[in-house]
Amino acid sequence: MMNYSLVILSLLVLLALLIAGEVDAHSCSPSGKIRGRKAPAGQCNQENYSDCCVKGKLYPTYTCSPRVTDNTRATLTLNSFQKGGDGGGPSECDNHYHDDDTPVVALSTGWYNGGSRCHNKITINANGRSVKALVVDECDSTMGCDDEHDYQPPCPNNIVDASKAVWEALGVPEDNWGDLDITWSDA
């Protein structure tokens, strides 16, 4: 004869494990690592406080980002999307450069989502203000430390890389530009 209490308990444990797995599916763990290579002389653009890869250092890579909500936590970083700026080549969404006076952003790979947010606006909140900015590029979380990425490390998985216009609209004093805790959402 079967013990129904044991069957029910087993099913409850299985259900709890499945629910826990679903919760873990929303987290974002590193997908791999790349080893830093030293940039050839003059090849790492350090405009806007950009880091250069350190030879031999292991950098985590990500194919995902935290789940997007109405108040997604992120780190705002500074980027120049102009030709010759630290953003590197033209933007992924339209293969164009964008003026630093235009509120544009690049999102970490998971949030960029294969370009699905291209030319959509997001709302960025910080410093008691908000600004809408156009998504024009990816902040690559899967690659880095090579010529294509100006010998800069891969982006963390929680980056909104913004033009100077975004920082100005948020009222952040220029001497505090670089890294800022923000929240953002799709506009």
Image (cartoon, grey):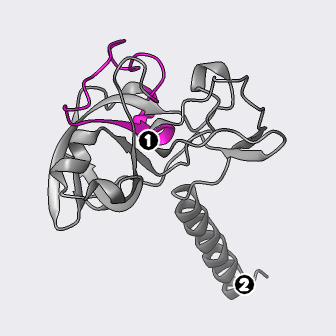
Looking at the picture, tell me which residue is in the foreground, 90 or 30. 90
Mark 2 and mark 1: Cα distance apart in space: 62 Å
Amino acid identity at mark 1:
Asn
Q: Is residue 151 left or right of residue 107?
A: right
In the rendered image, the residue lying farthest to the top is 95
- Secondary structure predominantly adopted by residues drawn in magenta: loop
Eye-nearest disc, 2 or 1:
1
Is 156 within the magenta? Answer: no
Q: Quadrant of residue 116?
A: top left
Tag 2 residue: 6
Question: Where residue 92 appears, x then y in whole percent?
Answer: 41, 20
Can see residue 99?
A: yes
Can see residue 122?
A: no
Q: Quadrant of residue 36?
A: top right
Question: Where residue 76 appears, x then y in whole percent?
Answer: 38, 52
Tag 1 residue: 48
Amino acid identity at mark 2:
Leu
Residue 74 drawn above or below residue 7: above
Residue depicted at x 63% and y 80%: 8
Residue depicted at x 50% and y 48%: 65
Residue depicted at x 57% and y 39%: 141
Residue depicted at x 37% and y 31%: 80
* Span highlighted in magenta in the image: 86-114
| Rendered-image quadrant of the N terminus | bottom right
Question: Where residue 174 appears, x then y in whole percent?
Answer: 29, 53
